[in-house]
């Protein structure tokens, strides 16, 4: 979530402000039905034990740790632009005994060779990016995926009804209407198609206290 590169070399910390980083895990758990939607992301990812997985904008590593727990034979990596939040992720992995590599870098210029991963997963991240950074991040995800690989994105999406449209307003006020408007309009699938993914579909739409989370699968 915190690798929010709206300009080259920039990121926005988790929850937008560094002083809120310590509250990241409890707030996300409280407001997003985190366990349920991340479990669904991993279900759609269908990670095999011999695959290589990248958690894009991994934050504190919750999703990467869950991926490793589901497929302990898999090679799991995480990347984020925020050094402070990566330290939290590394500490969590150490406590769990999970051999996950956490790297510092930006989504628009991933420090990995082409065809490095079988699966890329990303949650609550793309809504931080302006339209150009969304496109470049999607292109980078496609570049580092091996042929036949898949990208699973779980993020704020098009509200199902007026109640969900009202619920997403605090997210837009915090993270900015410019970056979140594409999500709320349901344009993430189009971004992924424009980045070169041939097959893109919204597999799930989940209600949360802060609006609709869409899960998008691309391959």
Image (cartoon, rainbow, N blue to C red):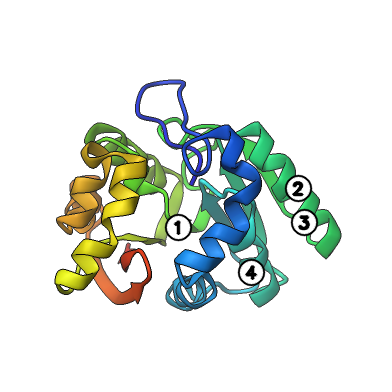
The answer to whether one can see residue 215 in this image is no
In the visual, does 112 lie left or right of 187? Answer: right
Mark 2 neighbour density, 10 Å: few (under 14) some (14–19) many (20 or more): many
Distance from disc 3 to disc 1, alpha carbons, whole Å, reads 18 Å
Q: Which residue is mark 3?
A: 93
Q: Which residue occupies 42% across, 75% down?
A: 44
Between 178 and 104, the residue placed more toward the observer is 178
Q: Are marks 3 and 1 in contact (CB under 8 Å)?
A: no
Distance from disc 2 to disc 3, alpha carbons, whole Å, reads 5 Å
**Splitting the image into 4 quarters, where does residue 179 fall?**
top left
Give the image location of residue 185, x and y in percent: 14, 55
Q: Secondary structure at mark 3?
A: helix
Q: Which comes before the other along the chain, label 3 or label 1?
A: 3
Q: Which residue is mark 2?
A: 90
Give the image location of residue 18, x and y in percent: 58, 33
Q: Secondary structure at mark 2?
A: helix
Distance from disc 4 to disc 1, alpha carbons, whole Å, reads 13 Å
Q: Are marks 2 and 4 in contact (CB under 8 Å)?
A: no
Between 154 and 47, the residue placed more toward the observer is 154
Q: Which residue is mark 4?
A: 66
Q: Which comes before the other along the chain, label 2 or label 4?
A: 4
């Amino acid at each position: 979530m915190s690798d929010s590169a709206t300009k080259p070399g920039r990121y926005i910390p988790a929850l937008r402000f560094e002083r809120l980083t310590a509250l990241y895990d409890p707030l996300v758990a409280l407001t997003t039905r985190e366990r349920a939607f991340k479990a669904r992301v991993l279900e759609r990812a269908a990670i095999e034990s011999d695959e290589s997985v990248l958690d894009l904008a991994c934050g504190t590593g919750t999703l990467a740790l869950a991926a490793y727990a589901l497929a302990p034979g898999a090679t799991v990596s995480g990347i984020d632009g925020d050094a402070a939040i990566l330290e939290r992720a590394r500490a969590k992995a150490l406590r769990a005994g999970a051999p996950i590599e956490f790297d510092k870098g930006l989504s628009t210029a991933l420090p990995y060779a082409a065809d490095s991963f079988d699966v890329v997963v990303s949650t609550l991240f793309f809504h931080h990016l302006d339209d150009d950074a969304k496109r470049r991040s999607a292109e980078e995800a496609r570049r580092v995926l091996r042929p036949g690989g898949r990208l699973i994105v779980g993020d704020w999406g098009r509200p199902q009804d007026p109640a969900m449209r009202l619920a997403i307003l605090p997210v837009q006020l915090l993270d900015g209407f410019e970056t979140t408007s594409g999500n709320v309009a349901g344009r993430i699938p189009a971004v992924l198609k424009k980045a070169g993914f041939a097959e893109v579909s919204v597999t799930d739409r989940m209600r949360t206290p802060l609006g609709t989370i869409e899960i998008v699968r691309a391959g």
